[in-house]
Image (tube, rainbow, N blue to C red):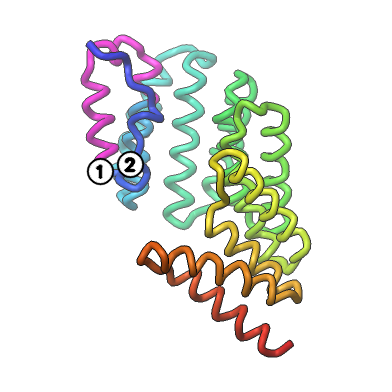
Amino acid sequence: MDTIPTIASLWDFNDPPGSRQRFLEAVARDDVRAETELLVEMQTQIARTYSLQREFTDAHRILDDVDRALHAVPGDAFPRARTRSLLERGRCHRSAGDADTSLPYFREAEKVASTNSLWRLAIDAVHMIALAASTPEERIAQNLRGMDLVREHPEEHGWTWALLNNLGEEYLGTHDYPKAIETFSALAEYQQERSGQADMYTLKDLAKAHRLNGDPHYSVRTMRAIMDELEARGTSDEWIREELDAALGAAAKT
C-alpha cells in the first residue's frame, strides 16, 4: 500500500468536495484506521470541508462524533486531534456569523497545542483568534502575537503570509497607513525571498497604502506595471484595475 497520506497532501481549499472525497478514501484505508489519532484528525478535516461550503449542520454532526471518540481516551491523549477538533468547531461558529461563540474554542485550541509544542496548530489558533476578535486593536494585537510565535518557531514561517496580510488589512482599516506600508512591504519581501516574486495582490495593497498615505504616484507606477504584465499575458483583474483607477484619480488632484 502507498505511504500514509498527510493531511496537507489531501487538501485543496479551492475544492472542498474534491478534498472531502480524498479524505473519505483515506479514512477507509487500513493503515490510516490503525493510526487512531490520525483517523480522528482526518475526520475533523472532513467536517471542515462541509464548513467551507456552509453546510454547518453536517460539520457539527461530524465534530460531535469526533468529540465522542476523544472523550473515550485519556484527556491528555491525541493532542493534535483535540486541537483540530477545537479549531474546526470554532471555524464552524465563526463562518456561521457567531464570532463570539468561536473564540473560546480557538483559545482552548491554542492552549492544547502550545502545551504539546504543536506550534503550527498553535499559530493557526492565534490566527483564528485574530480573525474572530471584535475590535481592530485586539485583531492587531493577536496578529502581532502570531508573528512573535513565528519568530520563536521559524520552522512555521508559512504562517507569515496570512498573518502579515491580515495585519496590513487591519492597519488600513484603522487608517494607520505608515504601518500598513511597513507591513505589506515586509510581506512582499517575504514572498520575493520564498518564491522569487511578490504576489500582485500584496503589491496592490501596498500601492493602496501609499495612495492613502498621500503618494498616489507610487500607486500609479506600481499598478501600471502590474496591468502591463497582465495585458502581456492576455488577461486582466478587476481589483488591479480598481486600484489603478483610484490612483489615477488621486494623482490627477495633486
CA distance separating discs 1 and 2: 7 Å
- Please name whichever residue, 87 or 209, is drawn nearer the observer in this view of the structure: 209
As drawn, the label of residue 49 is 2
The location of residue 82, given as percent across then percent down, is 48, 25
As drawn, the label of residue 17 is 1
In the rendered image of this protein, does residue 197 appear above or below residue 72? below
| Residue drawn at point x = 56 percent, y = 73 percent | 243
Q: Residue furthest bottom?
A: 253
| Residue drawn at point x = 42 percent, y = 21 percent | 70
In the rendered image of this protein, does residue 129 appear above or below residue 137? above
- Please name whichever residue, 102 or 211, is drawn nearer the observer in this view of the structure: 211
Type of the residue with mark 1: Pro
Does the stretch in magenta take in 30?
Answer: yes
The rendered magenta stretch, by its main secondary structure, is classed as helix
- Please name whichever residue, 238 or 9, is drawn nearer the observer in this view of the structure: 238
* Quadrant housing residue 158: top right
